[in-house]
Amino acid sequence: MAARGEFSSRTAFVLAAAGSAIGLGNIWGFPIQVASNGGGAFVFTYIVLTFLLAYPILMAELIIGRHAKTDTVSSILAVSSPGTRWLAYLTGYWGMLTASLILSFYSIIAGWMIAYFIGGFAELLGLVDVKAWLTEFSLSRNIIFCFVFYSLTISIVASGVSGGIERWSTRLMPALLLLMVLLIAYIATQDGAAEGWRVYLQPDFSRVLNPDLVINALSQAFFSLSLGVGTMMIYGSYVSKSENIAKLGASVAALDIGVAVLAGLLVIPAMYVALHNGVTIYDDAGNLIASDNLIFTVLPALFETMGSAGPVVAILFFSLMTIAALTSSISMLEVPVAYASESKNMPRAKAAWVVGGLVLLISLVIVFNFGTLFPLVIAFTTKYSEPLIGLLFCVFVGWIWHRNHILDEIKQGYPDAENGLFWKIWPTYVKFVCPLLVLALFWHSMS
Ligand code: PHE
């Protein structure tokens, strides 16, 4: 059997895992959530929940993954007991299904990014009709660009960890960050931006416990850190035993929050600049119009204020968005592909094309029934599946896997773990606090 892939360095892992975490969830999803859930109040609750719930569960996934060093189903089985094997299968398969379903809607949005990217060239060349087709919602556009995005995702996954995943993530994520910072600086020169900053940075504390806001912030925190589907478990499985895993996890979480906050600093002021320039964003009742389209409305409006530089900035921005989406989509596809190649002995490249092809079929079904299925699949995967599977991961590390074995695992690469803060808090925390908190938040949102 071929040797398993492994990330070649600590930086490579952090960038790849951050590449998985940072994606459309941060730059497309987070601003929509902020704009429809009361601005700063949402940002506040989201950050609190990321620390309280998402980081500890991220650690559970990374630790299980690095311990077992195999696909997700086998990893969870490795930490189960004879009586809980059924639960391990349930958790593993449910995670794999959720990863595939997330990929199926994610690639539709990512296809839009590619279309807008090419739209920038069409504008430069004066091809007005082509640009209109690329940037308006249509069946043909959605199908074609979904295909393009799948071909890219599948080809990268087919070539494995260090050749594919690592090479892309390490080079391109830093470029995205830089462009965002430059755009934020540009926004500061525009009228209307100050109002955006106020809405974004001043939480209205009377709203932070609103049940809808809390459950949306919970699912955003899970989605954004790629939790509850097995992605981080798989990435953990490619981490070398000589790394301090608690530290690595903290860097990934910090980068992910950082980019979400930056994306908000860009999109929310851009929204107010657009409002100032006469673009309609909220309806009379104060609801966000076409929320899926938020960044496709306000950012192009912003680029237009830049004169002839506009299309070039648009090309840069949407190309980097496509890359951010790719470093996430490859991590979703990796979950079922690792299973097919490690548990079912299928060659990696074949597994990538077969599984990728099947998920593409699901995307097509969604594209043809967009109005009903798109929001439904998003709600099923991000609102329910991810937090509940995260809860099951806590059950495994808190109640089933032996505590001393967990400590032994963490001690590899962090010999003094026993005396550190992480070990003092985390085991009890994932055992009691995380499961109860997830359940309480669900309860709260139902009542
Ligand atoms: N975290 C990714 C994003 O924010 C989405 C993702 C979810 C990736 C689940 C992998 C697994 O865009």
Image (cartoon, helix red, strand yellow):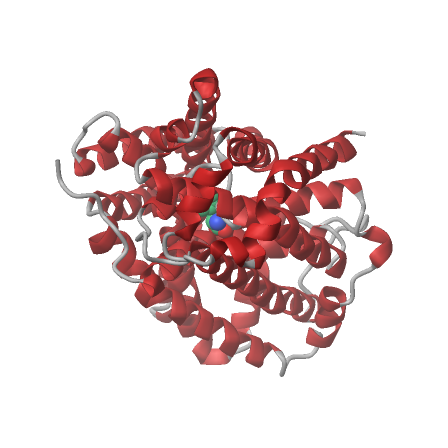
The number of callouts visible is 0
- Left or right: 170 as drawn, with respect to 375: left
- Can residue 78 be spotted in the picture? yes
Q: At 50% across and 43% down in the image, what residue appears?
A: 60
Give the quarter of the figure containing the C terminus: top right
Counting from the top left corner in percent of width and height, residue 242 is at 32, 57
Q: Residue furthest left?
A: 1
Q: Is residue 162 above or below residue 81?
A: below
Counting from the top left corner in percent of width and height, residue 227 is at 50, 43
Q: At 41% across and 58% down in the image, what residue appears?
A: 244
- Left or right: 135 as drawn, with respect to 152: right
Between 429 and 302, which is closer to the camera in this rendering?
A: 429
Q: At 32% across and 35% down in the image, what residue appears?
A: 71
Counting from the top left corner in percent of width and height, residue 432 is at 66, 37
Give the quarter of the figure containing the N terminus: top left
Q: At 48% across and 33% down in the image, what residue appears?
A: 402
Q: Is residue 59 above or below residue 440?
A: below
Counting from the top left corner in percent of width and height, residue 246 is at 48, 55
- Can residue 115 be spotted in the picture? no
Q: Is residue 263 above or below residue 162?
A: below
- Left or right: 318 as drawn, with respect to 189: left
- Left or right: 130 as drawn, with respect to 396: left
Q: Residue furthest right?
A: 206
Question: Residue 392, located in which quarter of the rendered image?
Answer: top right
Between 316 and 77, which is closer to the camera in this rendering?
A: 77
Question: Residue 30, located in which quarter of the rendered image?
Answer: bottom right
Between 391 and 423, which is closer to the camera in this rendering?
A: 423
